[in-house]
């Protein structure tokens, strides 16, 4: 049974890497929806500061 696990282990790592990037992007979108639905204006201001700091500035 050990040889079977050693055979599937690299495949599982590849599968996890392929699908983890999708989850990260989806998580940011869920966070964005939560921030925009928050009635507190301070949270939305902090979100806009965060977004502006991540975008490359035009020199």
Image (tube, rainbow, N blue to C red):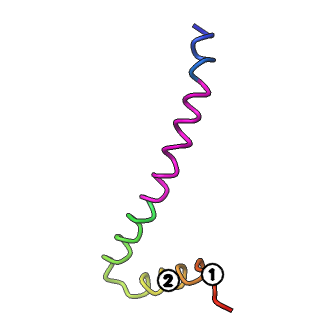
Question: In the image, residue 45 lies at what x, y percent?
Answer: 46, 87
Q: Crowdedness of circle 1 by 10 Å Cα count: few (<14), some, many (20+)?
A: few
Sequence-wise, the earlier of marks 2 and 1 is 2
Q: Please say whether residue 52 is one of the residues in the magenta stretch.
A: no
Tell me: residue 7, above or below residue 21: above
How many numbered discs? 2
* Residue of label 1: 56
Up the image or down, 26 lies above or below 13; here it is below
Q: In the displayed structure, would residue 58 be above or below residue 38? A: below
Left or right relative to 43: residue 53: right
Per the rendering, the mark at residue 46 is 2
Q: Residue at x 63, y 17 (%)?
A: 6
Magenta extent: 9-26
Q: Position of residue 57 (x, y in %)?
A: 63, 86
Compute the Cα span from label 2 to label 1.
18 Å
Quarter of the image with the N terminus in it: top right
Q: Secondary structure at mark 1?
A: loop
């Amino acid at each position: 049974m050990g040889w079977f696990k050693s055979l599937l282990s690299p495949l599982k790592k590849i599968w996890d890497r392929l699908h983890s990037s999708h989850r990260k992007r989806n998580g940011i979108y869920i966070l964005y929806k939560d921030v925009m639905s928050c009635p507190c204006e301070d949270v939305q201001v902090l979100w806009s500061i965060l977004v502006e700091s991540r975008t490359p500035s035009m020199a």
